[in-house]
Image (tube, rainbow, N blue to C red):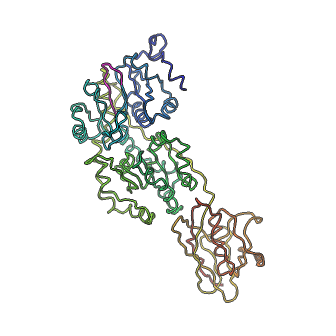
């Protein structure tokens, strides 16, 4: 792949490209691809803008100078793009250079350069790759501004003032376009049930999305164990947890390192979203966003999702929508009850402070592609196609694989009620009956777990007789429904080996009151999820 990018293209651009190309192409548009996140943004909006127009030839120029360039070539080749080396850009003479990365070193020339924001632009300060300092995200080098070649696309009129205050040379070089990504999210909101179904999240469960930008002040930079702690605190029956990690983290550290750092969370069922494209449908499927000062958190708040801030660096620009979100959104405090904080974030009072964040970030939603096409064709010096406005496509559902969870930790609390026979309620199939010894009362499960809980049915699991159930040494002798057979009571008790939480809860109920009561846990492991029995073994008439 490296050899392909070093070899100059002959078609659709090159010295003798006219001999080989099928589409003549009146204009040449070069997309500068420098990072995964910036390249992804162009790939998401450009097809709708240039739909059915063979007058424009599009070529991608790969700039390998970024610290986050890993994965760019794979993304371009997977998308079927024609990629030329950056050294060939000076020989092509393009009519327009389009990029979503403000750090590209465009060769000298006269063609205009249109810079799109790769997130919600001009919201934070980032390290400057050209000097040991920070700069406003989205600003291009002074040389492009002084030459009058650069145009900066904005999503809100207030961003013009922010850019002008931070860099006076950008005066008159901004164009109000809007945010195509937010328009796409808003247009796809009606398909939220399909996105949740693809992720395996039903109507009876909540999806918590953990969003982290990149850098030491990001959520994963400050609390890399937060996904695992959330998975341990939230009930499995009612919650799923997904993680959207900034593509720069994937590029800087690699997928292998990222998965090793999140190993405990992945073993507990974390949905780790791929770095390109898939995050949008996952965000739409979410019920809550636990994030930081990154754009995904702000997108979630603008879509009306409750937000809980796990971290928020000092990188945000004062007066921006991101800064307002950071001042008003509740914080997730380490060391306190994580489940209680998550539940509290859904309250209307917790969401009132940042309810209007969308109006501060996006102007006239739904018109971004229309405005972008008008700007692009004006810079290309071509009339717009007569095919009508570009369509806003609904996002396709995506499936995010998760590791199967095979280890569970169950915590129960057993109490005693009136004497008499009892059986578990809600058990489908064979109902195990408890036959108390003389003068003893049936057990009642009414437990909670502070780590990982699941509502479970008090009853033996469906498994082979050879491996289940164990024969407990207990005054309670379970009997199958419709059968007079009892389990032999003389055999020594042993811990069950089943992976099922239902099995472990049944074991705890069966051994209640025994002098040799085993620990009510099943196959515990360092990353085990805890489940608890919430059923009650109520007494019934004999």
Magenta span has 113?
Answer: yes
Write the start and end of the magenta stretch as one range: 106-116
Residue at 36% of width from left, 32% of height from top?
103
Q: Is residue 402 above or below residue 376?
A: below
Q: Position of residue 67 (x, y in %)?
A: 44, 35
- Would residue 186 be found to the left or right of residue 512 on screen? left
Residue at 34% of width from left, 20% of height from top?
95
Predominant secondary structure, magenta span:
loop
Residue at 61% of width from left, 62% of height from top?
408
Q: Which image quadrant for residue 379?
A: top left
Magenta span has 521?
Answer: no
Viewer-side residue, 289 vs 212: 212
Q: Position of residue 436 (x, y in %)?
A: 68, 83
Q: Which image quadrant for residue 152?
A: top left
Residue at 54% of width from left, 23% of height from top?
3
Q: Is residue 82 above or below residue 119?
A: above
Q: Is residue 318 above or below residue 170?
A: below
């Amino acid at each position: 792949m490296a050899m392909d990018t070093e070899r100059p293209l002959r078609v659709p651009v090159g010295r003798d490209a006219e001999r080989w190309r099928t589409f003549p192409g009146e204009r040449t548009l070069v997309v500068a691809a420098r990072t995964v996140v910036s390249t992804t943004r162009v790939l998401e909006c450009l097809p709708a803008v240039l739909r059915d127009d063979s007058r424009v030839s599009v070529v991608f120029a790969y700039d390998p100078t970024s610290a986050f360039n890993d994965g760019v070539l794979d993304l371009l080749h997977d998308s079927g793009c024609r990629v030329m080396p950056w050294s060939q850009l000076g020989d092509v003479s393009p009519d327009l250079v389009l990029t979503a990365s403000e750090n590209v070193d465009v060769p000298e020339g006269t063609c205009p350069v249109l810079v799109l924001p790769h997130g919600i632009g001009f919201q934070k300060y980032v390290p400057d790759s050209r000097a040991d300092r920070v700069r406003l995200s989205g600003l291009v080098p002074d040389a492009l501004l002084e030459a009058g070649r650069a145009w900066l696309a904005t999503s809100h009129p207030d961003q013009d003032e922010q850019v002008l205050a931070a860099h006076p040379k950008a005066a008159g070089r901004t164009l109000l376009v809007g945010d195509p990504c937010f328009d796409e999210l808003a247009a796809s909101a009606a398909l939220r049930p399909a996105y949740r179904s693809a992720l395996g999240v039903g109507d009876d469960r909540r999806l918590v999305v953990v969003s982290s930008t990149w850098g030491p002040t990001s959520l994963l930079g400050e609390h890399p164990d937060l996904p695992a702690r959330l998975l341990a605190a939230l009930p499995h029956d009612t919650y799923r947890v997904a993680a959207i990690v900034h593509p720069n983290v994937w590029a800087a550290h690699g997928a292998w390192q990222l998965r090793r750092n999140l190993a405990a969370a992945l073993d507990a069922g974390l949905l780790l979203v791929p770095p390109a494209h898939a995050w949008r449908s996952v965000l739409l499927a979410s019920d809550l966003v636990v994030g930081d000062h990154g754009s995904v958190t702000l997108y979630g708040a603008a879509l009306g999702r409750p937000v809980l801030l796990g971290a928020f660096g000092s990188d945000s620009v004062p007066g921006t929508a991101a800064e307002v979100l950071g001042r008003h959104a509740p914080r997730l405090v380490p060391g306190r009850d994580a489940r209680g904080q998550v539940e509290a974030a859904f309250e209307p009072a917790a969401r009132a402070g940042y309810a209007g964040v969308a109006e501060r970030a996006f102007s006239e939603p739904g018109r971004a592609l229309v405005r972008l096409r008008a700007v692009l064709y004006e810079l290309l010096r071509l009339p717009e196609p007569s095919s009508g406005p570009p369509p806003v496509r609904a996002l396709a559902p995506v499936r995010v694989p998760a590791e199967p969870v095979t280890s569970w930790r169950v915590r129960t609390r057993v109490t005693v009620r009136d004497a008499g026979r009892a059986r578990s309620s809600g058990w489908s199939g064979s109902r195990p009956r408890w036959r108390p010894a003389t003068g003893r009362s049936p057990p009642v499960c009414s437990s909670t777990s502070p780590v990982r809980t699941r509502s479970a049915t008090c009853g033996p699991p469906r498994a082979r007789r050879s491996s289940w159930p164990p024969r407990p040494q207990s005054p309670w002798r379970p009997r199958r429904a419709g059968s007079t057979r009892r389990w032999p009571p003389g055999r020594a008790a042993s811990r069950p080996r089943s992976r099922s939480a239902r099995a472990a809860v049944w074991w705890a109920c069966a051994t209640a009151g025994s002098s040799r009561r085993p620990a009510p846990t099943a196959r515990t492991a360092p990353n085990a999820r805890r489940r608890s029995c919430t059923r009650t073994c109520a007494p019934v008439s004999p």
